[in-house]
Image (cartoon, rainbow, N blue to C red):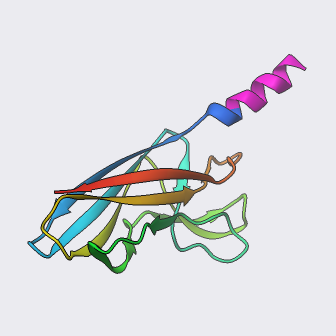
Amino acid sequence: MLLAIGSISYAQVHDPVKWSTSVKKISDKEAELIAVATIQKDWHLYSQEIPEGGPIPTLFTFEGDSRYLKKGNTTEPEGHVVDDPIFEMKIKYFDTKAVFTQKIRLKTAEKFTVKGVVEYMVCTGMNCLPPKEVELTFNVN
């Protein structure tokens, strides 16, 4: 029984992905919001583009704000496409590190903060953790 309780509490506190954010100013009217996922060894983070019936894809949402406009969709690195043994389909994922970027058009020169949320799922070759949401903050200067 202690082993079962230990396994459950480990799964609840284990977080194999750490997120960091930054902002790259491209011009007076444009910037890039950058979210970096640092992924622990043996774990992988799924792409934003996942076939139906697969794991939960990574999803970014950004709070609406009159000081900026989103330009296009959030981009992601190349990653790895593999035949996933758990979901029995070809799936794109990232290991070690993934850098996601979202371009925005600036409507003001003042400093402000963009709030966002990333929902994601991580797995090893043996098991998966439930989907998780993490709040992200981008300081636009």
For residue 103, above or below residue 46: below
Q: Residue at x 35, y 56 (%)?
A: 35
* Residue 24: percent from left, percent from top: 18, 60
Comparing 37 with 89, the one in front is 37
For residue 25, above or below residue 132: below
Where are the magenta residues, as a range?
Answer: 1-10
Give the quadrant of the N terminus: top right
Comparing 65 with 85, the one in front is 65
Q: Is residue 8 magenta?
A: yes
* Residue 46: percent from left, percent from top: 55, 60
Comparing 104 with 49, the one in front is 104
Q: Is residue 119 magenta?
A: no
- Asked if residue 26 lies left or right of residue 36, the reply is left
Q: Residue at x 49, y 39 (%)?
A: 40
Q: Residue at x 56, y 59 (%)?
A: 119
- Asked if residue 59 lies left or right of residue 11, the reply is left
In the current view of this chain or complex, which residue is farthest to the left? 28
* Residue 25: percent from left, percent from top: 14, 64
- Asked if residue 140 lies left or right of residue 102, the reply is left
* Residue 82: percent from left, percent from top: 57, 65
* Predominant SS of the magenta segment: helix
Give the quadrant of the C terminus: bottom left
Quadrant hosting residue 55? bottom right
Q: Residue at x 55, y 45 (%)?
A: 43
